[in-house]
Amino acid sequence: MTRLLVYAQSPPPLHGQSVMVGHLLDGLQQSGQCHLPAEPTPGTSPAIAYYHINPRISKDLGDIGRWRPGKLLAVFRHVLAALRARFVHGLDTLYFVPAPAKREAMYRDWFVLFFCRPFFRNVIFHWHCIGQPAFIENKLTAPERWIARLLYGKATLSICMTQYSREEASYFGSKKIAVVPNGIPDPCPRFDTEVWPERQRRAEELAAVWSGPAASPVYYELLFLSGRMTSKGLFDAMAAATLANHCLAEKNLPLRMRLTVAGAFEDDAERVRFEKAAEELNSTRLPGQNASLAVDAGWADEKKKIELYQRADCFIFPTLLAESFGLVLVEAMAHGCAIVTTRWQAVPEVLPPGFPNLAEIHDIEAMAAALLRCAQQPADRSLRDYFLEHFTSARFTANMIRTLSQP
């Protein structure tokens, strides 16, 4: 039995890495693994006994990777808790999620690994972020590079989410590398009875617009949802929706793209830029219509996210940030949304082979063409089926248990 210290953050704050750690912990518990200090359930033979340290030091998304004096004290407390758990529970394997490519965040990692790594026979790194090798080579000093290679190097196992990430993990010389795609609990369990019939009705409504005059205006509902705005392509999404609407106006069709934006703006400058882009999108309104085509939905909790995905016809995600996976794409697939995104880093690996709605970053014309293409297609549940086949929590948990139990 692997006796595992899970040193990784679970929500809050809510972001891809913390969400997946939460799913991992839930999966371990639900599959009957031994959650220390409890004893195994009689009659079971768990492959893993685990203890969780939640090293939360950031207040919110904007605080991640930033230096505050209070963070150092918090990290010190977490290290002491990890070492105590190591000896009290006889743990032999350290599961650790390395920080993103930011100097202050890496310093935190180094502090933890310097004190903890020598006391564990096995070390497992789960690489949720990418870009560390390039950052180490191009941004760190020679002494810092030496420290990084020493503390991240030669782990027993590196877990990556895609083949793209695997190439980066190999930089650190892990003895073994495993690719385990993320998986989530089905956020839309009533898809067949409630969501799919509505998607079919919507497709018929849109088809009527393209085939003949419509009695009233119709909107193709787009959704952009992210914890980051500019770097995830918000303004490219707005530009693509604006261009698509100009094309619809030229065809004299009573159809417009309406974009709902969910997330938190990083600063006032970003909000001002959004308002300016919203004015440009609203300039493409149908004659006589005053409703905004750029809807700021604010921050979305889990309940609100589900409502937004179910209401959306298409999820647009023109990301240009370092992408090791793209959890929002999996959520959109689970709800049966059409998807338009960028051919960028690991993103294509999350989607079905030959997926047509991939554009190069900043290629607004290609994104607008993809939006118009999606708005003309019949109802299609193939992305929902792809989610069920590849990205469920049951599949993720089974793969992680098999991987963690044989480091």
Image (tube, helix red, strand yellow):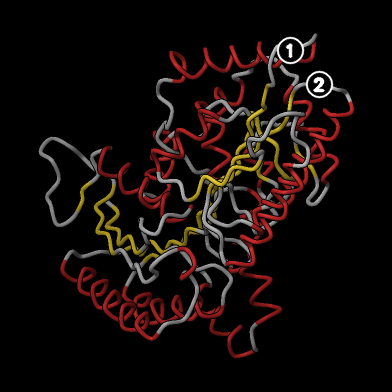
> Label 1 is placed on what type of residue?
Ala
Label 2: how many residues lie within 10 Å, few (<14), some (14-19) or many (20+)? some
Residue at (55%, 22%) from the top-left corner?
385
Q: In which quarter of the image is residue 290?
A: top right
**Do the residues bearing badges 1 and 2 touch, measured as CB atoms within 8 Å?**
yes
The residue beneath circle 2 is 253
Element on which disc 2 rests: loop
Is 393 located above or below residue 201 in the figure? below
The residue beneath circle 1 is 214
Residue 106 position within the rendered picture, expressed as x and y whole percent measured from the top left: 51, 76
Residue at (52%, 70%) from the top-left corner?
154
Query: In this orientation, which residue lies closer to the viewer: 125 or 406?
Result: 125
Q: Farthest residue to the front: give it.
A: 288
Left-right relation of 335 to 247? left
Residue 188 position within the rendered picture, expressed as x and y whole percent measured from the top left: 43, 27
The C terminus - image quarter: bottom left
Residue 304 position within the rendered picture, expressed as x and y whole percent measured from the top left: 43, 39
Is 8 located above or below residue 366 in the figure? below
Q: Residue 360 carries which label?
A: none
Is 256 located above or below residue 304 in the figure? above
Element on which disc 1 rests: loop
Q: Distance between the residues labelled 1 and 2?
A: 8 Å
Residue 251 position within the rendered picture, expressed as x and y whole percent measured from the top left: 88, 23
Residue at (36%, 55%) from the top-left corner?
11
Query: In this orientation, which residue lies closer to the viewer: 179 or 100?
Result: 100
Label 1: how many residues lie within 10 Å, few (<14), some (14-19) or many (20+)? some
Left-right relation of 170 to 39? right
Q: Quadrant of residue 287?
A: top right
